[in-house]
Amino acid sequence: MADKLDLNILDKLVLLALDDEKGTFVSDSMVFGYCLAGAVIFELSIRDRIKIVDGKIRIVKEKRLNDEVLDYCLDIISDSKKDRKINHWIEILGNKEGSIRKIVLDKLISLKILQEREDKVLWIFKTKKFPTKNELPENLIRKRLNDIIKSRAKAELDEIMIISLVDSCGLNNEVYGKALAKEKAKKIKSIIKEYQFADNTGKVIKELHDTILAVLILIISTTTITTTTVN
C-alpha cells in the first residue's frame, strides 16, 4: 500500500515523525529540518539528478521529477553557480524546513493519509495539527523497519537511509519503542556502518548520516556557546 502510493523517503520520514493522534511533530524542528535535507539529497542522488564528487554535490541533469518537493529543492541546488559541499546544502535545505514540510504535508493530506485540524492555544493563537487519517501506510513502514532491526528482513538501500535518518533525528524511541530501541542500538548503528562500502549508494547513505550529525553537533555547540556568552 505504501509503495503503491509512491511515497518517497521524505513522505515516510514525516509520517514517522508525527504523533498519530495529536498530529504534532515529535522531533525538534531544527534537527528534523536537516534530516529532511538529507532525505532530499539521497532522493535526488538515486534518481540521477545529482551525484556526489569529492564531498561536493554536482548537478547531473535538471529534468523535472514531477515531485513537487524534490523539484523545489533541485531548483535551489541548480541555481548555485558552483558545486558545493554536502554540509552546505544540508544547512541551506535544512533552513527551508518550513517550506519542505508544508509541501510534504499537503501531499499526504491529498492522499488522505493525514488530515488537517486547526486548534487554538490559550483560546487565542491558532495552530495546525496533522493527525493520521489512514494508518495503514505508516504501519507498513514501521513494520518493515522493525523487522529489519530484528534481523527478520533484509533491508533495501532506501530503508537503510530511513533507518539512518530516524537515528539522526533522534526518533528511534518513537519508531521502535523505547525497549527495542535500547536493545537494538548497536544493531541500528551496524546497519548504517555495514553499507558504507556496499556500493556508491551505500557510501552516500553513510556520508549523509555523518554529515547530518556533524552539522547538528556544530549548530548545537554554537548555540550553547552563544547562550553561555550572553548569560
Image: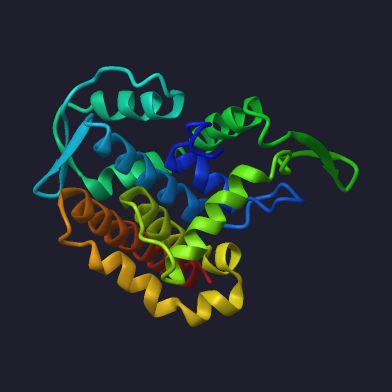
Q: Is residue 32 left or right of residue 197?
A: right
Quarter occupied by the N terminus: top right
Image position of 44 with respect to 225: above or below: above
What residue is drawn where x is 21% and y is 33%? Answer: 50
Image position of 109 with respect to 184: above or below: above
Image position of 92 with respect to 139: above or below: above
Looking at the picture, tell me which residue is in the foreground, 38 or 203.
203
Looking at the picture, tell me which residue is in the foreground, 141 or 62.
141
Res 170 visible? no
Colouring convention used in this rendered image of the protein: rainbow
What residue is drawn where x is 39% and y is 53%? Answer: 159
Q: Give x and y (percent) for residue 3.
A: 48, 37
**Which residue is farthest front?**
152
Q: Is residue 228 left or right of residue 19?
A: left
Q: Give x and y (percent) for residue 151.
A: 41, 70
Q: Quadrant of residue 191?
A: bottom left
Q: Give x and y (percent) for residue 224.
A: 45, 69
**Which residue is farthest right?**
123
Q: Quadrant of residue 113?
A: top right
Q: Is residue 227 left or right of residue 106?
A: left
Image position of 3 with respect to 163: above or below: above
Q: Give x and y (percent) for residue 92.
A: 35, 40
